[in-house]
Amino acid sequence: MSSFRRLALVAALISAPAMVRAQVYTSVIPGTKTGGSANVHVLGHIPLDAQGHTADITIEQELSRPYVYTAHRMIPSGIDIISVKNPSKPQLIYSWRIEQAELHRGAGSLNTIYLKSRGRYYLTDAFQFSQGGPDVDLGAIVWDVTGLPDTSKVKELTRIRLADFPGGFHESYGYKHSNGQALLVTTIQGPWAHLYDIDKVVAGGDPNQGLVGRVPLPGDIKPGPSDPLSLTGYHDFYVGYDPATHQDKFYGAGLGGYYVFDITDVAAPKLLTSLTGIAGVTWGHTFTPDPTGRYAVTEAEYQYAPLRIFDLKPGLDGTVKTISRPIGAWNSDWKDLAHNMEVRWPYVFVSAYLDGFQVFNMMDPTNPYTVGYY
């Protein structure tokens, strides 16, 4: 299942967080939930597609570049760029759709990511086209978006293709490595995550010359009968620098559970710990640590599954070989399914299929509680 973060809210203001003891919704359509808590306010809303074609979204982090990038999945596949310079009046400033869109098959455009390197700003988008149409080997497209807000300067630079692993990249992640490399981390249709140096990718010639490392799925992990047919390795990941250990760490969710690797040497990743053998979890969807790297929030992607919170310390210390028991759990509604999340300590921002936008507090990871929603 794709990381399907619908652009329902372009921006939200969270003020005076406090425990929300009961969620009260109003409904204009029978069986649906609408409304929100008093401390969440919609600043702007921009309808993009009524057919559920809006996939992942990324937002630049410099105030001088107020740009939101979204993926337009299915047919026609492409990307959209939105300006939130005025959050109350977001504007769609650029759209692109792939050539001969109607001939393509599968999910297509899924995952926009941006990277900055050597004064240039790059937008990448991961694609996953299936057999029966063109571009089955297309993994990602890279654009130079340095010239925004002048959209005439948006320029496609290259396309990453993997003929040996058709099916594209389901997910990707952007990370500035401690060695200075701006890395694009991607899934492939195999038991690895690929690490691309964006400067080498756009240098000209074969973009695959930018492949500087591969993070393996641990060798003892094999697909089971309940694993998604399309999942052959990793699904989502997070990459971050740990100042306490001076390590660049990769947190990967995929077959069997969740895995932490040291990728300080991108050419030689080292497994640090794993979360496997978890009751009710045969594969990991999303794996996001807190800023200390000790606690992590995970998702498993099936109805009734809560977001689980784990203490990684026993595994990182070498006390246990693998971690199999969470220390906490959270869900907005036990009957529904929470999807992806972002951790901004102590808050966790969650997208949910039936429960919209949720925020919970994990200051005490054993007792997380809801502080806002819409």
Image: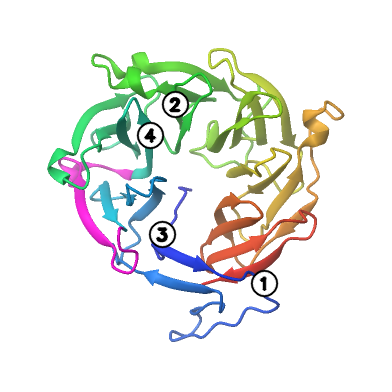
Q: Quadrant of residue 361?
A: bottom right
What secondary structure is marked by label 1?
A: loop
Q: Earlier in the sequence, mark 3 or mark 4?
A: 3
Residue at the spot x=39%, y=40% of the render? 113
Q: CA distance from mark 3 to mark 4?
A: 22 Å
Q: Earlier in the sequence, mark 3 or mark 1?
A: 3
Q: CA distance from mark 3 to mark 1?
A: 26 Å
Residue at the spot x=63%, y=41% of the render? 283
Mark 4 highlights which residue? 115
Q: Is residue 162 visible?
A: no
Residue 219 on image: x %, y %: 65, 20
> Counting other residues with Cα less than 10 Å from the Cα at mark 2, is it few (<14), some (14-19), or many (20 or more)?
many
Q: CA distance from mark 1 to mark 2?
A: 38 Å
Left or right: residue 278 compared with residue 214 = right
Residue 211 on image: x %, y %: 41, 17
Image: magenta residue range: 85-108
Q: CB under 8 Å between callouts 4 and 2?
A: yes
- Whether 196 is among the magenta residues is no
Q: CB under 8 Å between callouts 4 and 1?
A: no
Indicate the amino acid at tag 4.
Leu
What secondary structure is marked by label 2?
A: strand
**Front: mark 3 or 4:** 4
Mark 1 highlights which residue? 18
Nearer-the-camera pick, 326 or 225: 326
Indicate the amino acid at tag 1.
Ala
What secondary structure is marked by label 3?
A: loop
**Front: mark 2 or 3:** 2
Q: CA distance from mark 4 to mark 2?
A: 8 Å
Mark 3 highlights which residue? 6
- Whether 94 is among the magenta residues is yes
Residue at the spot x=63%, y=78% of the render? 23
Indicate the amino acid at tag 2.
Leu
